[in-house]
Structure formats: C-alpha cells, structure tokens
Image: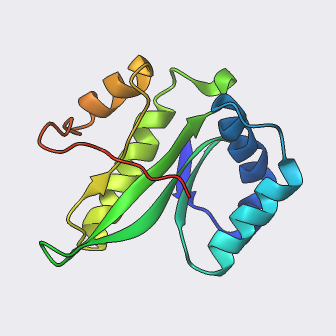
Amino acid sequence: MEIRKARLNDLQHLTPLFDGYRQWYGQEAALEAAGQFLEERLLNGESVIFMAYVEGIGAGFTQLYPLFSSVTMERLWLLNDLYVDKKFRRMGIGEGLLKAAQAFAQETRAKGLTLETQVSNLSAQRLYDSTGFKKEEDFYHYFWKA
C-alpha cells in the first residue's frame, strides 16, 4: 500500500472513488461533476487529499479542508471525507489514511483534526476510536440549511 498527497494526475483514480463515496451517502452518480469538483479544490489549494494505492490501483482517499479556531487562534483541519473502495476494505487502508492526515496536521502545526460521522456508521466510529480520535461530548453540532 502506498499513501501520498494527491496531485492533478491522480484525478483518474480519485474521481471514481469520490463519486462512490458520494453515492454511499445517497447521492446520484455524477462522475464528470465529481472530477470537476476535485480538480477545482486541488487547483485552488482549497483542500488536501491523500490517496491510497494498492498495486497502482486507487483504493481509498481522505480529503481535508482548512479551518481556524478563533478561540485558540490556531489552524485545524476538517477531515471531511474518508472512503475505501469495498474490495480494499479490512486491509488497514482507512487507518493508513487517518495516520497520514494526523501526520499532516502535525507537520502544519495544526491544533488537530475534526470530523463527523453518521451515528449509524459504527465501523467508522471504531476506526476513529482506535486511531486516537475522541468523541466530542462538550459541544452540540448544529446545521443551518440555506
């Protein structure tokens, strides 16, 4: 397994994974739009994406978005997406991607990583627990839909 920061030439492997991730969350397939979305993020430096490859095949990815804490006046990263293709699950890829994200957060002197997952996604919760993430119990998560 190889994990590295994604570049534009990784889009051919990344785009189908990203579209699969979106479909897992109930969205319609939109391969072309997914590719455009990712290309814009990379070109504009708006996200950092780590790709996992197994024998040259795109196996998974995680996407981080920059955030800042006004209270602590520090950078942090939103781990917004984490996905491993079904045929590559249970191979340690998700853990490898999380560790790459954690190392990146340390390299960028960030306060840490923040993420959210569905209450029903127990396998993801086990992974996060096993890699040092702590469930936030002091704050509620709110969302306003425009």
Outermost residue on the right side: it is 32
Estimate the x, y position of residue 81 in percent, counting from the top left. 52, 47
Q: Quadrant of residue 71?
A: bottom left
Estimate the x, y position of residue 133 in percent, counting from the top left. 23, 39
- Res. 76 in view: yes
Estimate the x, y position of residue 27 in percent, counting from the top left. 73, 37
Q: Vertically, is 72 above or below 35?
A: below
Query: Could you tell me how many numbered marks the image carries?
Result: 0
| Colour mode of the rendering | rainbow
Q: Residue at x 51, y 20 (%)?
A: 90
Q: Residue at x 39, y 18 (%)?
A: 122
* Quadrant occupied by the C terminus: bottom right
Estimate the x, y position of residue 89 in percent, counting from the top left. 57, 23
Work out whether residue 28 or residue 91 is closer to the camera in this orientation and state it.
28
Q: Is residue 44 left or right of residue 126?
A: right
- Res. 54 in view: no
Q: Vertically, is 39 above or below 137?
A: below
Q: Residue at x 32, y 22 (%)?
A: 126
